[in-house]
Image (cartoon, rainbow, N blue to C red):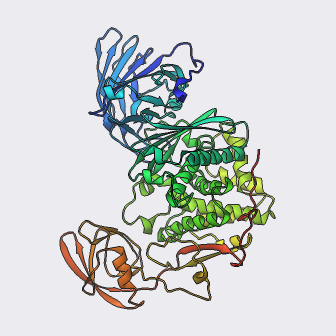
Amino acid sequence: MTLFASRPQAAIADAFSIQYRVKLTDPHAHVFEVTLTIERPDPAGQTLALPKWIPGSYLIRDFAKHLNRLSARTHDARPLAITPLDAAHWQIEPTEGPVEVRYQVYAWDLSVRGAHFDATHAFFNGTSVFLAVEGQRDQPVEVILEPGQQAFQSDWQVATTLPALATNAQGFGRFQARNYWDLIEYPVEIGTFQCLEFEACGIAHQAVFTGKIEWDRVDTEQLKADLTRICETELTLFGTPWPIERYLFQVMVTASDYGGLEHLDSTALMISRDDLPYLGRKTVYPDAYLNFLELCSHEYFHTWNVKRIQPQVYQRPSLTEPVYTRQLWWFEGITSFYDLNILWRAGILSAEQYLTRLSKEMTKVYRLPGRFQQSVAESSVLTWTKFYQQDENAPNAIVNYYTKGALIALGLDLTLRRDTQGKLSLDDVLLALWRDYGRTGAGLGEGEIEQVCERVSGLDLSDFFARYLDGTEDLPFEALFASVGIEFRLRAPSHLKDMGGHLGDEDDLEAPFEAPLVLGANFVQTEHHTLKVRHIWQEQAAVNAGLAPNDELIALNGFKIESLSRLETYLSRHQPGDTLSCHYFRRDELHTTDLTLMPPPQDRVSLRYHDSNDQPSEEWTPWPMRSRN
């Protein structure tokens, strides 16, 4: 196995004035030991800073809370005073000549955002480990990775796209970065892992998998083929010259995690081991595996849309204070539209399967009343608080700029196709942004994306953006889908876990099915065999009865309700308008209330062909799509 880290590249600088040495000191204490050498510190007193947030994840995380034993000394070992200025800044006393700063990083955050280190592996993002030298962030830096001394670490290897200068067979050694902002774009994974290698459009790609996996049961050939198709589809969409020379998927496999974070030429992912494609599975593409592929598609798409096409405010931020933009509807929403669309373009999903998954994605928006309370533009600006710090009232108060942003992308694509008679699509806007901003490095100002949409299409889209981006209206999907031969409709759920999609003949308007009664609440099963309320929907049965988040439902009309299936069975015996006595615990207090049942809401999305008797041919597409070289 040949890893990227073992492929030395030409030196960026003849000599480095800033050097970081990271040593894997103690996996049992979860400690990295870092030595920062500054050859030319500020003679007035050098200021250091550690980021409070990481690009791509918009929450103040205060990584400095994991930094310990910070000290400084001169090149001849004379101690220097180092004073905290605030939660993220420190100042070293004035001195002449090189300064050495030492500190430890406690690494026990098993996520794609932080740092984690134990006897199974080591992983870190630069924002958690590398103190920035203020006033010198533009300077090239050298990084030295040192292995630990534990016996089980003897066969550990390094997987990173951090440019190497000189490394050993395991990938440890000297690396470099052009500047501090470049440095934090290369997460590092160290350990024993499974590795897939493949080429996409002639570019070397690797996927390394860390965690406990029955690798001999994984269908690695299918996985390699699907990742290749996804990457080649996206590379072909944007066209040459490619923005990357290599790419690395760093995948941490656990029991139930899911998420990803994009970087310049790599991505850090976390998935459940159930998301992998196993040999002997009943279908080639079970939903869990498709979720993983969609995650890969999403983060890979960020190679262009976010990491290179980006808002001005995201270009070289200090990372110690929030930055605000209303543009996340594009950077996350449009990416969320394409991540699924790419699976169809790549031939992984059929047209019918694509419409089914698209229906379910749309249902996530239509189920939440918060879409009428907050615009997507406002959701973007307030991501630091309302979106990344959601409370139990979130479904009623906020909208998700990922999912609703994807709907705006879908609506914009259909609008462009309809109003230009099929001559233009969202692809044309995307490629214009890539040409004029991504390739040039120019940042996007507020409102500039909307201007590009109008300039490329020649259409007046001011009403579209006023109503659906800055406003809270639902997009006119019935008319938009009709323009491409697809029927869009909202229906009631067929069961409590129904997340949307076409049901078949019973979904016909002339043959309504019997929908289950719902209470307007999300429940989670407790160890006490009760149902705990997680979220409450406003103006539905549960909230009208006085139920609240964290209440435990005990019984209805004197009958114990211990599971969702039991709840659904019991409700099936009743009709809208029936009033049930409801017993529940709030904290340790038993309460009783009357709960009046209401008709199920029409909030599940169904997409189907206008003539349900027609089956699409192999050449049929949901609507015309074009790829560009």
Give coordinates of residue 539: x percent, y percent: 42, 79
- Whole-percent x and y of residue 479? 70, 74
Compared to residue 173, the image places residue 305 above or below, namely: below
Q: Nearer the viewer, residue 206 or 77?
A: 206
- Closer-to-camera residue (172/597): 172
Choose top left, top right, bottom left or bottom right for residue 102: top left
Q: What count of labels does the image hold?
A: 0
Residue at the spot 23% in from the left edge and 74% down from the top edge: 585
The residue located at (42%, 85%) in the rendering is 598
- Residue depicted at 32% across the width and 74% down the height: 563
Tell me what residue is drawn at x 36 percent, y 28 percent.
153
> Is 420 located above or below residue 262 in the figure?
below
| Viewer can see residue 495 | yes
Question: Position of 401 compared to 147: left or right?
Answer: right
User: As rendered, which of 282 and 103 lies closer to the eye?
Assistant: 282
Q: Is residue 277 left or right of residue 190?
A: right
Q: At which x and y percent is residue 599?
A: 46, 85
Res 380 seen here: no
Name the residue furthest front: 280
Residue 188's x, y, as percent? 46, 33
Q: Please identify the quadrant where the C terminus is shown.
A: top right
